[in-house]
Image (tube, rainbow, N blue to C red):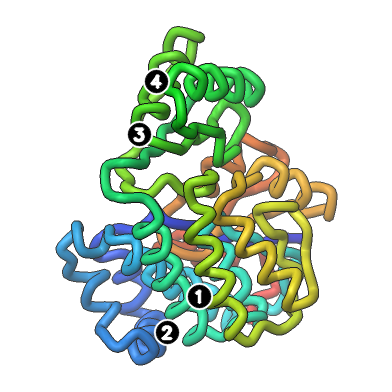
Amino acid sequence: MTYAVVFPGQGSQSIGMLMGLAEVHAQIKETFQEASDALGYDLWQRVQNGPEEELNKTHITQPAMLAGGVAVWRIWQSQVKAQPVAMAGHSLGEYSALVAADSLSLSDAVTLVADRGRFMQEAVPSGKGAMAAILGLDDDKVGEVCAEAAKNVVGEVVTAVNYNSPGQVVIAGNTAAVNCAVELARKAGAKRALPLPVSVPSHCSLMMPAAERLAERLAGVAIQAPVIPVFNNVDVQAENTADAIRDALKRQLFSPVRWVDTVQAFAEQGVQQVVECGPGKVLAGLNKRINREMTGLTTSDLAGLDKAVQAVGEGK
């Protein structure tokens, strides 16, 4: 079977995540210890014991999700012979994919995404930015709604930022403009239009100051050519040079996540199965709505991991 691996981003974290896997597979705690050594605090303890408001702080969530995805990938590598033909990650998950593809070291990546989280939070004061999910409108209609909202709330920004699946688009920008777009989307016939519980308006132009700071940070990080192609969020391209990867990661902060296009690119590669490596099952749900011909497999617990290993086959 031809398969791809994907890594979830912020939003899939939860207190106690991966504990079931950790009780059986040493790679989980070993990976979190490696991350903790780089960060200077006990990341596993934060993940297991919280409190939730602490885990949900962007600069902690990002290294926690990255370490979780890489830890599960390491278990996967120990059990499956066949390599994926491609990888991708949703937003933050792109960093997990680059670590899994030996492009970034784990220690560099966890400190990098911790700083990325800080840069994002500091770019927009608390309460000034927002995100919302729009369900049941096509992409063009969401774009029209955002354009109208931006006209109504002069001087503020709101744009589509995550093309997650057909009929599911996330918008982001200044709080008043996002709230206006939510009301307009409801009037336009959206099945649901609801604000998301986040404090950072990711992937919109408000993140450009954070992107500049991230670019400076990326310049000092060693990046190798990925051993497995990693499709980026911005261009849906698998870059091979350090400069191109750095540029894509910078632009990712203020550009939409093109997840529908990413899954369609997998299909063009002949992918039949998509394995979600890490906490949660969000991407498997999205992928099912994008392309039903590809089987989605999750690995966030023992039962899911065992099923995925058997489905892909060629176990070691």
Q: Is residue 296 above or below residue 291?
A: below
Give the alpha-carbon distance from disc 2 to disc 1, as whole Å: 7 Å
Give the residue pinned by disc 1: 70
Q: Quadrant location of residue 197? A: top left
Q: Point out residue 257 in the picture as x, y percentages from the top left corner.
A: 60, 47
Q: What residue would you read off at disc 4?
A: 180
Three-letter amino acid code at the position of disc 4: Cys
Element at badge 4? helix
Closer to the chain start, of discs 4 and 2, is 2
Inter-mark Cα distance, 4 to 1 = 39 Å
Q: Which residue is mark 2?
A: 31
- The alpha-carbon separation of the residues under discs 4 and 3 comes to 9 Å
Distance from Cα at disc 3 to Cα at disc 1 = 34 Å
First-in-chain label (4 vs 1): 1
Q: Which sits earlier in the primary sequence, circle 3 or circle 1?
A: 1
The reply to whether dot 4 and dot 1 touch (C-beta < 8 Å) is: no
State the SS at label 3: helix
**What residue is shown at x 40% (from left), y 36% (from top)?**
174
Q: Secondary structure at mark 2?
A: helix
Amino acid type indicated by mark 2: Thr
> Looking at the image, which residue is at 55% across and 58% down?
276
Q: Amino acid at mark 1?
A: Val
Which element carries disc 1, helix, strand or loop? helix
Tell me residue 217's x, y (percent).
Answer: 53, 77
